[in-house]
Amino acid sequence: MSLTPPGSSRPTRRAVLGGAAAATFALAATAAGAGTATAHTRPGRPESPVRPAWPAEFALPNGFRPEGIAIGGGPYAYMGSLADGSVRRADLRTGEGRTVLAGATGGAATGLKLDRDGLLYISGGLSASIRVLDTRTNRLTATYRPTTAGFVNDVILYGDRAWFTNSHAPVIYTVPRGHGRGGDVREVPLGGDWEQGPAGTISANGIETTPDGRALIVVNSPAGKLFRVDPRTGHATVITLRGADGVVNGDGLLRVGRTLYVVQNRLNVITVFDLDPRARTATLRRSISDPRFDVPTTAARLGDRLYLVNARFTTPPTPETTYNAVAVELR
């Protein structure tokens, strides 16, 4: 999620032509952890197919202000509200949805990730909170409040913990995964090549894992850079981009195998990179644009589709402002 003004750096002409249309710091990511940004299914069950008749666009409640999206193996999507922290569940077969977690004044739900056990990890934005929702009972099982204030932005599941970016401070938070897992939120300071912006502005945004499962990938929105981050130490190394000038306004990250999708929100484009196993380099493959994009923030995958929520940051939010989610084909 990003509230920074649009940057001047866009994908290169080649990009446009090419794609228009551990206990605590475990270094070996589990299959569930490394794959949490993709479609989730119950253990032992195949990924749900997407049927052509399923809607590729559906409305959300007026004033909802969506920011994050996660997909489970129902197939259902969970979307968080930047307005009040509520969470909505939508049936992707019909687009119909309902609220599964009520909002509150001062609340926010930005990044979302759904684990295989049904637990949904929720970033709290400016509320500076981390919540865990059991989607089988629709009850919160844990709430964390980091000591370092800031904007808790996005989340990835890695090893036996969930990892969160703080957009207003050079630190990553991590909390335990799983039912009945105790423990406090822990903080890992970012160092090395990391570039932190002025106080109160967005820096760290989307977060993912590397293909080899040994590190994290974090996008710095205003800098337009991707960083490889050692989860044990927080040491950040710039990932070399090939074929693109940068990823300004980079928001949600989604990795499928060695393919990394970077949602550049205010540019209304998804930039697609090929990663080497250690994510030292990212080579531009193509870009995805769609006339239905209206400042998309994050993406989740089901089958051959990416589903995105339109945050519409360039439209003044009111209780009557309309919002929606859209899907694009990956074929």
Image (spheres, rainbow, N blue to C red):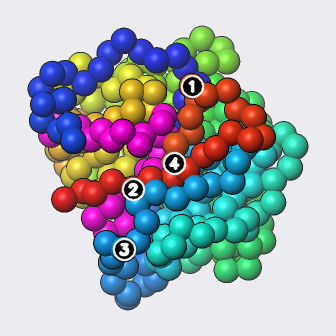
Q: Amino acid at mark 2?
A: Ala
Q: State how far apart marks 3 and 4 are (Cα).
A: 20 Å
Q: Residue at x 43, y 84 (%)?
A: 43
> Tag 2's secondary structure?
strand
| Mark before the other along the chain sequence, 3 or 4 | 3
What residue sits right under mark 2 in the picture?
Answer: 327
Q: State how far apart marks 3 and 2 are (Cα).
A: 12 Å
What residue sits right under mark 1 in the picture?
Answer: 314
What residue sits right under mark 4 in the picture?
Answer: 309
From the image, state whether disc 3 or disc 1 is nearer to you.
3
Q: Residue at x 46, y 57 (%)?
A: 57
What residue sits right under mark 3 in the picture?
Answer: 53
Residue 152: percent from left, percent from top: 65, 39
Q: Is residue 60 visible?
A: yes
From the image, state whether disc 3 or disc 2 is nearer to you.
3
Q: Amino acid at mark 3?
A: Ala
